[in-house]
Amino acid sequence: MSKRVLVTGGAGFIGSHLCERLLAAGHDVLCLDNFFTGRRENVARLLDSRAFELRRHDVVEPILLEVDQIYNLACPASPVHYQYNPVKTVKTNVVGTLNMLGLAKRVGARILQASTSEVYGDPEVHPQDETYWGRVNPIGIRSCYDEGKRVAETLMTDYHRQNHVDIRIARIFNTYGPRMLESDGRVVSNFVVQALRGEELTLYGDGAQTRSFCYVDDLVEGLMRLMNRDGTDGADVHRPVNLGNPEEFSIRELAEEVARQCGREVKIRYCPLPEDDPRQRRPDITRARNLLGWSPTIPLRDGLARTISDFAARIENP
Ligand SMILES: NC(=O)c1ccc[n+]([C@@H]2O[C@H](COP(=O)([O-])OP(=O)(O)OC[C@H]3O[C@@H](n4cnc5c(N)ncnc54)[C@H](O)[C@@H]3O)[C@@H](O)[C@H]2O)c1
């Protein structure tokens, strides 16, 4: 059944892929974005569709709309961007989420919050399942994002308990793919851009720290399944769900694979590890498998190939 779906942050990396998939599924999509890290080009080819609408709007300001579902993705996701104006990052997560919850409550929409694995902080348990409460520094340079997202989860849960808003919370782990910003400082985009330019790959720490990398199409599939999973069978759909790829790679392995695919010798420059950088991060996705029948299908090798060809096209035709 066709729905009216709002995607905040819809001109960003994940949001633009989500808008595309929602349109393909026959929904009317309204994309709100303040274009801080999002770009019109990300959704340019959707503008021809009568079912798609793009509006410049900052979620920190209230808005009145009639929608059936809200995907609340608005928030810069990479440290360079969320640390650029940390107070704004907190406002986006807290005031922005409050505004979206107010809207959901008013119009009876179901709302999905894009949360993050960063709510686990530097975890003492590995891998992390959703029952783990996290180990987060409240006053560090990443706190505007980590704690902002934790408050957003609190707000979501309290609106559900207090006002019966129909909520979904996705704890998204590292996601990569076409349309990531070249300058976002995230490890995949850094390595791909450096390798394509024939530069040394910058590796923070000794490269033994591990991460899991989920291809964006897999992630979007998980988000849509979570949004559309109802709880009529008694399933607990309102608690957070990890979405990520449990396959773990060291940062050094990632560097080597990127270099191999770009046809380069690996030249690595070692730099000091930034403050509060977690050593390990890997999702336990048992809950997503059981609740949504979801697990990632695209191996890192294939996802990297698609990502590298997108970056190569952008670097050649800036
Ligand atoms: N990419 C990942 O690996 C990852 C991991 C965990 C969580 N997430 C979450 O997923 C969501 C999307 O991430 P992304 O990787 O696509 O990042 P992104 O920076 O590409 O997208 C965020 C979008 O939100 C917009 N935005 C930011 N502040 C806004 C505001 N106040 N009002 C309106 N729009 C605003 C930006 O312009 C951008 O289009 C974010 O909420 C992020 O925290 C992403």
Image: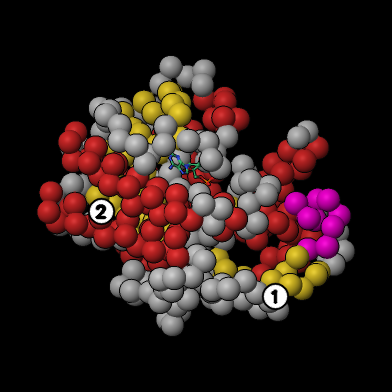
Say which mark, if any, is on residue 49: none
| Neighbourhood count class around disc 1 (C-alpha, 10 Å): few under 14, some 14–19, many 20 upward | few
Residue 279 percent coordinates (x, y): 56, 77
Contact check, label 2 and label 1, Cβ < 8 Å? no
Q: Identity of the amino acid at label 2?
A: Met
Q: Which residue is mark 2?
A: 156
At x 45% / y 65%, what residue is drawn? Answer: 143
| Frontmost residue, 79 versus 27 | 79
Q: Is residue 250 above or below residue 78?
A: below
On-image quarter of the C terminus = top right
Does the beta carbon at disc 1 come under 8 Å from ligand 1? no
Q: Is residue 266 visible?
A: yes
Q: Which residue is mark 1?
A: 272
At x 73% / y 58%, what residue is drawn? Answer: 191
Q: Identity of the amino acid at label 1?
A: Pro
Residue 260 percent coordinates (x, y): 80, 60
- Give yes or no for residue 229 being in the magenta stretch: no
- Badge 2 marks a residue whose secondary structure is helix
State which quadrant residue 109 falls in: top left
- Badge 1 marks a residue whose secondary structure is loop
State which quadrant residue 202 falls in: bottom right
C-alpha separation, residue under disc 2 versus residue under disc 1: 37 Å
Q: Is residue 146 above or below residue 216?
A: below
Q: What segment carries the magenta color?
A: 193-201
| Frontmost residue, 206 versus 3 | 206
Q: Is residue 260 visible?
A: no
Residue 291 percent coordinates (x, y): 30, 58
On-image quarter of the N terminus = top left
| Frontmost residue, 302 versus 94 | 94
State which quadrant residue 228 falls in: top left
Q: Nearer the viewer, mark 2 or mark 1?
A: 1
- Give yes or no for residue 196 being in the magenta stretch: yes
